[in-house]
């Protein structure tokens, strides 16, 4: 019986055709596939983006923290669990391609009326029914194959979502580490400025003691020194917040963050242009674009699932069973029976099916608009990140020149003030200018580090962690 069902199903399947539209990936516009308009000497548009871009910083501590985040971050665990759920759903849908078998058995004990008792049969006895039903849906119109196609799209979308979470976690972890290191450097600069102003204050106080200046000058330089001292705890708090964030991203409590993670006291810097590629490579690499594209494919396949309901469903089935009085008679030659035949069901009122088709088509339009929006957002984010990075570098160049000039002016005014050539107000103004440019330059370095990470985040990543 089973061989007959499978042979008939195979013959019908060869003649099957899947209804509904076949998915075609949307073409990339030439303007989106070309070079980035915000490319600058700070990036290399001829080289593909690095898969493991954080290794460009050449920091083994950062490499270890990234590995910890990829292994223990809670958001990644959620994404991986969702991917596992999508894969389980795909296996469930694939199961519809196989024959469905149902086995059953029942046992009852009863008494027959005397008039109904056949000869030789006890009036009181067990009645046992057993049976096995087998059914196989012939996928003539592609309802099952389109469902499998849609479920496979869901799996690929969930896989891309997991990759997007990993990209975000790598960028967030790198940024937290970079913020902590930048804050440490800014803290050192702030302390150095305070120490410099302390020396200027002592010189001013000595001059006031011998009558070469007034107490007002001393008060002004002391006020500037205290203003800069007030920056120290604020920067220290920023550093602690970055370290706490780093601990959470790597799956640790703040107290469990290893000491090596706090050792770096210099801003992350690159010694080469950032490889960025072009728009076409970006759209192929960005996981959110891949996820949106796969959801569009799944939505297109579900049009076919809904369309198949307009056509009849054909199932091949069979059953074998036995009814007997007592265990001894259950498998005798008499009570054993079997059935074999096709089953055709057809909804002759297609209004509901057409409504489902319309809903599936609308969902596909939603998925298409989402895909188009995701592509535009990816390009916008990348262009914005590249432009911000280039302008941050330009700003640092100007700030460094201003800082260097302010340092020269401060040294000259200190010497002139010691020799009594200028008053303390001129020196105070020079010290204030130098302190401002020094602090601003340190902050600009931190902003460049953040801008670099934003570029890497926008570029996405084509790598896949093991087990994804």
Image: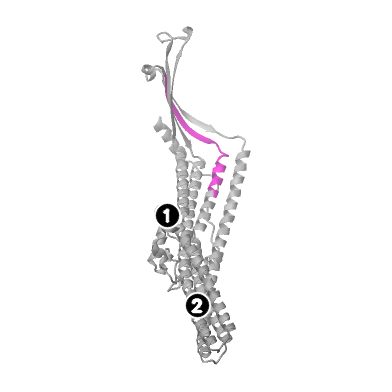
Q: Is disc 1 placed on a helix, strand or loop?
A: helix
The segment highlighted magenta reads: 299-323
375 lies above or below 421: above
User: x, y percentage for residue 23?
Assistant: 52, 51
User: x, y percentage for residue 324?
Assistant: 41, 17
User: x, y percentage for residue 51?
Assistant: 42, 63
Check the image and name the residue furthest to the top: 115
Work out whether residue 234 or residue 264 is closer to the camera in this orientation and state it: 234
Work out whether residue 391 or residue 47 is closer to the camera in this orientation and state it: 391
Judging by the rendered image, the residue that carries numbered circle 1 is: 72
Work out whether residue 171 or residue 13 is closer to the camera in this orientation and state it: 171
| Residue 38 shows up from this direction | no
Work out whether residue 379 or residue 393 is closer to the camera in this orientation and state it: 393
Report if the CB atoms under discs 2 and 1 are less than 8 Å apart.
Answer: no
Marks 2/1: CA–CA distance: 40 Å
- Position of 121 with respect to 228 (left or right) is left
Q: Is residue 445 magenta?
A: no
Q: Is disc 2 placed on a helix, strand or loop?
A: helix
* Badge 1: residue crowd in 10 Å (few <14, some 14–19, many ≥20): some
Q: Residue visible at 44% across and 35% down? A: 99
Q: Earlier in the sequence, mark 2 or mark 1?
A: 1
Of the 4 image quadrants, the one containing the N terminus is top left
Looking at the image, how many numbered discs can be counted on the residues? 2
Judging by the rendered image, the residue that carries numbered circle 2 is: 193
| Residue 157 shows up from this direction | yes
């Amino acid at each position: 019986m089973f061989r007959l069902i499978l042979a008939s199903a195979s013959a019908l399947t060869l003649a099957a055709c899947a209804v509904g539209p076949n998915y075609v990936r949307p073409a990339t516009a030439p303007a989106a596939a070309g070079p980035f308009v915000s490319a600058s000497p700070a990036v290399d548009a001829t080289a593909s983006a690095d898969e493991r871009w954080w290794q460009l910083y050449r920091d083994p501590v950062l490499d270890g923290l990234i590995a910890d985040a990829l292994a223990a971050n809670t958001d990644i665990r959620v994404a991986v669990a969702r991917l596992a759920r999508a894969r389980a759903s795909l296996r469930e849908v694939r199961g519809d391609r196989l024959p469905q078998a149902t086995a059953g058995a029942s046992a009852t004990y009863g008494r027959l009326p005397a008039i109904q008792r056949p000869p030789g049969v006890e009036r009181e006895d067990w009645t046992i029914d057993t049976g096995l039903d087998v059914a196989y849906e012939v996928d003539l119109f592609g309802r099952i194959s389109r469902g499998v196609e849609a479920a496979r799209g869901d799996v690929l979308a969930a896989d891309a979502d997991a990759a997007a979470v990993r990209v975000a976690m790598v960028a967030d972890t790198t940024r937290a580490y970079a913020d902590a290191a930048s804050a440490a450097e800014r803290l050192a600069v702030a302390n150095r400025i305070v120490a410099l102003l302390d020396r200027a204050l002592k010189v001013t106080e000595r001059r006031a003691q011998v009558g070469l200046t007034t107490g007002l000058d001393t008060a002004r330089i002391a006020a500037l020194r205290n203003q800069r001292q007030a920056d120290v705890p604020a920067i220290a708090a920023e550093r602690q917040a970055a370290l706490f964030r780093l601990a959470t991203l790597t799956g640790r409590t703040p107290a469990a963050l290893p000491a090596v993670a706090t050792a770096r006291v210099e801003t992350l810097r690159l010694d080469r242009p950032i490889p960025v590629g072009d728009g076409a490579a970006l759209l192929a690499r960005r996981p959110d674009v891949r996820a949106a594209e796969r959801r569009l494919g799944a939505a297109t396949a579900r049009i076919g699932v809904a369309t198949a309901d307009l056509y009849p469903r054909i199932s091949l089935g069979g059953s074998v069973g036995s009814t007997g009085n007592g265990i001894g008679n259950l498998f005798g030659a008499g009570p054993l029976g079997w059935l074999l035949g096709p089953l055709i069901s057809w909804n002759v009122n297609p209004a509901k099916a057409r409504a489902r088709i319309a809903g599936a088509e609308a969902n596909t339009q939603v998925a298409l608009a989402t895909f188009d929006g995701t592509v535009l957002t990816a390009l916008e984010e990348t262009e914005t990140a590249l432009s911000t990075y280039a302008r941050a570098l330009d700003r640092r160049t100007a700030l460094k020149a201003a800082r260097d000039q302010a340092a020269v002016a401060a040294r000259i005014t200190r010497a002139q003030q010691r020799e009594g050539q200028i008053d303390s107000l001129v020196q105070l103004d020079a010290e204030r200018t130098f302190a401002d440019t020094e602090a601003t330059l340190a902050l600009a370095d931190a902003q460049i580090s953040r801008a670099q990470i934003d570029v890497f985040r926008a570029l996405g990543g084509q790598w896949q962690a093991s087990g994804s």
